[in-house]
Image (tube, helix red, strand yellow):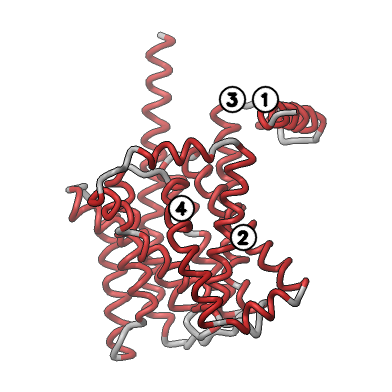
Amino acid sequence: MSISMFSNVFANTLATTAARLPLPAIWTTGSVQQRTLILGVSFAILSNVLFGVLYAYSSFLAPLSGTQVFIWRMLAMWAALVGYLMVSGRLGLHIDKLKVIRDAKQWAWLLLPTPIFLSQFWLFMWAPVNGQGVQTAMGYFLFPLMMVVFGCVLFGEKLSRLQWLAVAFAALGVGSEVIRTQSVSWATLWVCGTYPIYYILRRMQGIGAVTGLLVDLTISAPFALAYLFFFAPNSVALVGGSGFFIMMLIGLGVLSVLAMKTNIDASQMLPVNVYGMMSYLEPALLFILAVTVLGNPFESAMIYSYGLIWLGIACLIAHGVRQLRQASRKTALSIDEQMA
């Protein structure tokens, strides 16, 4: 049986099974758009929960350091992603997209965001077990706000009053933290300052998320192997001699790809505003995990500065809700005009 035939059989079986389940009425009687929205929200929630699990993953892999877990994660993700693309028959599609790039300058332009990607993934695995979990989570809270600022500066996007208010609250929050501590965490600045650059560069390049991820992981794989064998041979011996570590690293790769895949699917199924609001679930989970499970320090004085940042986030959510309502009204008016 070919992969495509297997996929069709699996899809038909899934549909038949779903029809027998006591699903909500909106799923069985609602429109295709409603079912797509429900599925998109489900994917968004699942991806954010998986990212939360991955945030705490390093703590379960002691005595491996955060950097070593990052290296193993890159290799496990590459293997899981290539395996998934091969089984789904999509690997050739992404390779064909890259074959058209022949000029050295084009390749240099394509690989320019890769160091940012690698540094962000390293920080994601390193920070929770090195006392920077709360600060990194705050960087993810600030990330959407910085995207708004970058969009305004680089693409001339106009900001609404709520967006301006959100940026103002965030600036006050960061300023308050700087005054309180006479500094600001480098982890926070690195996340909110460089991650937007990565996404903007990929957008300007016209590279899809999966193709970009395949490029980033493929480029990093040889360096990851070199690091393990030349700088962390004890890590190789530890993992190679333990069935527990092997299974945990396989799980790390599978969960990483599943989290990325469901996140991409959600971004394609949901309206931009809904997807943007759902994205705040991840930093909230990271923040909670950092304080509770990982035991990262959180001082009561931080509530004032972080509270201002959360007020900014609330303004962005309110802006998104307002835009959704306006879009719904326009859709309803359009339908009424067509029926008239």
Q: Residue 154: image x %, image y %?
A: 19, 53
Quick one: SS at disc 3? loop
Give how far apart the Cα atoms at labels 1 and 3 are: 7 Å
Q: Along the line of sight, which residue is nearer the eye, 182 or 203? A: 203
Residue type at tag 3: Ser
**Disc with the residue nearer the chain's start (2 vs 3):** 3
Which residue carries the number 4 mark?
Answer: 213
Query: Is there a contact, CB below 8 Å, between mark 1 and mark 3?
Result: no
Residue type at tag 1: Thr
**Disc with the residue nearer the chain's start (4 vs 3):** 3
Is the residue 328 above or below the residue 112 in the image? Answer: above
Q: Residue 41: image x %, image y %?
A: 57, 45
Which residue is drawn at the image coordinates 29% and 46% (left, top)? Answer: 205
Q: In the picture provided, is 22 more to the left or to the right than 3?
A: right
Q: Residue 121: image x %, image y %?
A: 47, 67
Q: Along the line of sight, which residue is nearer the eye, 145 or 304? A: 145
Local crowd at mark 3 within 10 Å, few (<14), some, or many (≥20)?
few
Which residue is drawn at the image coordinates 44% and 46% (left, top)? Answer: 211
Q: Along the line of sight, which residue is nearer the eye, 293 or 53? A: 53
Q: Along the line of sight, which residue is nearer the eye, 264 or 164? A: 264
For residue 31, the mark is: 3
For residue 253, the mark is: 2
